[in-house]
Image: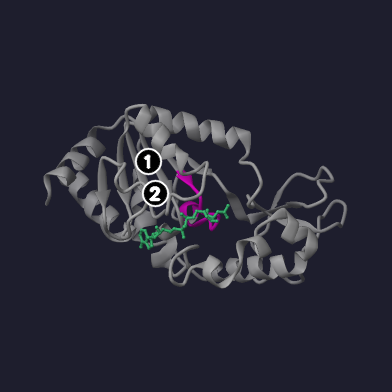
Amino acid sequence: MPTDTEELVYRLRNARTLVALTGSGMSAASGIPTFRGDDGLWRNFRAEELATPEAFAHDPRTVWEWYDWRRTAIANAQPNAAHAVLAAWSRRPGFTLITQNVDGLHERAGTANVIRFHGSIWELRCAAECGAPPWEDHTAPMASLPPTCPSCEGIARPGVVWFGENIDPDVLERSSQAAAAADVFLSIGTSSLVFPAAGLLHHAKRNGAFTVEINPGATDVSRVVDLPIAAPAEDALSMLDARVKMG
Ligand code: OAD
């Protein structure tokens, strides 16, 4: 095992604060396509046709058909070994998980202290902002599309962040604070192309975190981190967990 990995194992054992930022590569082993991989969701669909407020205003049914297809695929998937390791680590004090994933697999694996940076595909809200609070809906496939707001009976929208929309200020603040306080910051299964999520690693590094990337492919941050681990999340996290436990 390379010395660098030994150092990470040591740091993982001794970190007072540990932050993991996850992206769609985390759920690849669960059979859910990433956004920008060979089978990626954005290869077959144009983002601006589906994941923008303008697309939804223009054709809510088509946008909902795409979300309903994804919800059904996710409902039939299971959390994988990588989710299980982070769920186990989330039991320690000082752990924060920031996920760009809207699939809810971290929560299904039993992870504590999850910040949903891009929202949740299982949350719906009124598109007309009638004042109804957001609600959970786990039906997949949905009975009729588009679904409606229980309060005003207008069209409902998925509770996710679309291109051109801002991250919830409270979510951004909590994420920034966790990143700044991190002793160890792990960036897992993300292309690090989408901001502001991708900025969290730089923020952590500037504030003294030991930074690690786990990704079988190279990204813009592979040369920035203290330790790049070029392996799938499910393999790398299982290996690290076994080493951390070995004591
Ligand atoms: P991407 O599709 O951009 O990147 C997925 C990354 O996962 C790639 O760098 C792959 O190399 C890596 N990967 C593939 N299999 C892996 C595995 N088994 N283990 C670890 N890594 C693996 O997805 P994200 O970075 O999540 O935003 O995309 C970020 C955001 O762009 C998403 O949250 C979504 C999308 O547009 C919104 O919808 C707002």
Q: Residue at x 46, y 39 (%)?
A: 199
| Rendered position, 12 above or below 69 | above
Query: Whole-percent x and y of residue 165?
Result: 66, 46
Residue in view at x 83 percent, y 50 percent = 128
User: Which label was assigned to residue 137?
Assistant: none
- Residue drawn where x is 78% and y is 52% of the image: 127
Residue at which label 1 appears: 91
Magenta residues (range): 98-107
Q: Residue furthest right?
A: 152
Q: Residue at x 64, y 65 (%)?
A: 67
Residue type for callout 1: Arg
Along the line of sight, which residue is nearer the eye, 41 or 46? Answer: 46
What percent of the width, then of the height, locates residue 216? 31, 60
Image quarter for residue 138? bottom right
Q: Is residue 247 visible?
A: no
Q: Is 210 situated above or below 58? A: above
User: Cβ–Cβ below 8 Å for labels 2 and 1?
Assistant: yes
* Residue marked by disc 2: 87
Q: Is residue 106 magenta?
A: yes
Residue 100 drawn in magenta: yes
- Number of dots carrying numbers: 2
